[in-house]
Image (cartoon, helix red, strand yellow):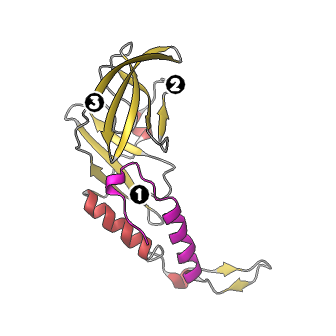
Amino acid sequence: MEYNNEQLYVYKNSGNKEILKYVFVPLIHDIYAIPVDEELKWTILDEKRKIGNYDCQKAAVSYGGRNWIAWFTTTISIQDGPYIFHGLPGLIIKISDEKLDYDFELHQITDFRWDELYPEKFQRKINWESFRKLQQNFYNDPFAMINKSDVISYDEGGNTTKTNFKVMKEQTQKRIREKNNPIELNHKAAFK
């Protein structure tokens, strides 16, 4: 569920100000969308610096149980940025949480097709509580959606062997616990 965190997908519709965070259920590849409606209350600070070719100004915001520092440029009058971040008087060039668990930085501006970047369809919209339940269900039985009788395992010699789902479950749960550091700490599932 979000134990991997390799990819972060959001959909932003500036027309109706809708932001959707896409979440993926591993193994079965279902896609859900969580509406992100928390208001970002920015504090624009006096500090300025140059990042790449852009003159930037510092701003701070709290989101998802984390404190963030952003650097934005008014040279590009797009009031947007990475992930769900938006609403400053210019493009966010860099934003990091205070622990540097997450660090986004603009590397390139290019023309591309949005429909190739974002999945267009999701199974359904859910809320954060439903997402926590999906995460907990996946954690409790990561292989629930697999027909275990169809799984064939092989030993080091290439011989067929019985699949040890108990060990696989324990290894998967350990990996989930170790990587349980979502952006939205205020919606973090407590795995034990």
Q: Nearer the viewer, mark 1 or mark 3?
A: 3
Instruction: Residue 51: say if magenta.
Output: no
How many numbered discs sit on the rendered protein?
3
For the record, the magenta segment spans: 166-192
| Alpha carbons under labels 1 and 2: distance apart | 27 Å
Residue 42: assigned label: 3
Residue tagged 2: 108
Disc 3 residue type? Trp
Q: Residue at x 37, y 72 (%)?
A: 137
As drawn, the label of residue 24 is 1
Residue 177 shown left or right of residue 58 in the figure: right
Is residue 67 positioned above or below 52 on the image?
A: below
Within 10 Å of the Cα at label 1, are there few (<14), some (14-19), or many (20+) other Cα atoms?
some
Q: Quadrant of residue 131?
A: bottom left
As shown in the figure, which amino acid type bears the numbered disc 1?
Answer: Phe
Give, as a three-letter code, the residue at label 2: Gln
- Whether 178 is among the magenta residues is yes
